[in-house]
Amino acid sequence: MRHYEVVFIVHPDQSEQVPAMVERYRTTITGKNGRIHRLEDWGRRQLAYPIAKVHKAHYVLMNIEVDQETLDELEHAFKFNDAVLRHLIVAMEGPVVAPSPMMREERKPSRDGDRDRGDRGDRGDRGDRGDRGDRGDRGDRGDRGERSAPRPAPVEAAAAATPAEPEAS
């Protein structure tokens, strides 16, 4: 039997059906001598891009060990379940039992409140930016040229530039 990581996302209107879906998939896997090494319900999360005008979905991650027949049956169940928006099955080298980064314990809040700076680090008060000169109100654009659209020529000048039609007598 091979190891796989399975992620599927469920339409947010069917979020209450997720436990029943997971139980159905669990019985499919274990009923054919498969094993579930890790099962994580990530809950509703923002999608990277809308799918069928849906902006949030319910995420579930499973690390399983099954044979090809069971995997095909599981994939068939995903394809024909209208509540499953997307699914991904990835072959793995071995069993994964450690919690995923999504489920790891949240870091303690930083000193500046509830925002976590992540990999960017603390930027301080930004007082160390160096001398940038007096910018004033930035009204003087100097060498950048005028940014507005060119003005149309006055009507009198446009009429004088066009040749006059001979008058009929």
Image (cartoon, rainbow, N blue to C red):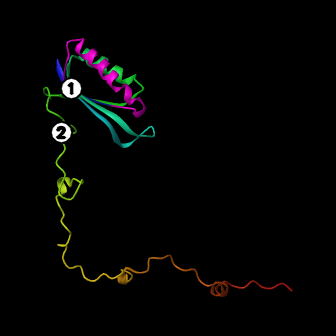
- Residue in the image at 24% along x and 11% along y: 31
Magenta stretch contains residue 27: yes
Q: Quadrant of residue 68?
A: top left
Is 13 displayed left or right of 118 in the figure? Answer: right
Q: Which residue is mark 1?
A: 4
| Marking on residue 104 | 2
Helix, strand or loop at mark 2: loop
* Quarter of the figure with the C terminus: bottom right
* Quarter of the figure with the N terminus: top left
Is 49 displayed left or right of 5 in the figure? Answer: right
**Residue 166 x/y as whole percent:** 77, 85
- Residue in the image at 36% along x and 81% along y: 137
- Residue in the image at 30% along x and 23% along y: 22
The type of residue carrying mark 2 is Arg
**Residue 62 x/y as whole percent:** 23, 27
Mark 1 or mark 2: name the one nearer the start of the chain.
1
On screen, residue 123 above or below 34: below
Is 1 displayed left or right of 82 in the figure? Answer: left
**Magenta residues, start to end:** 9-37
Nearer the viewer's eye, disc 1 or disc 2?
2
**Residue 147 x/y as whole percent:** 44, 76
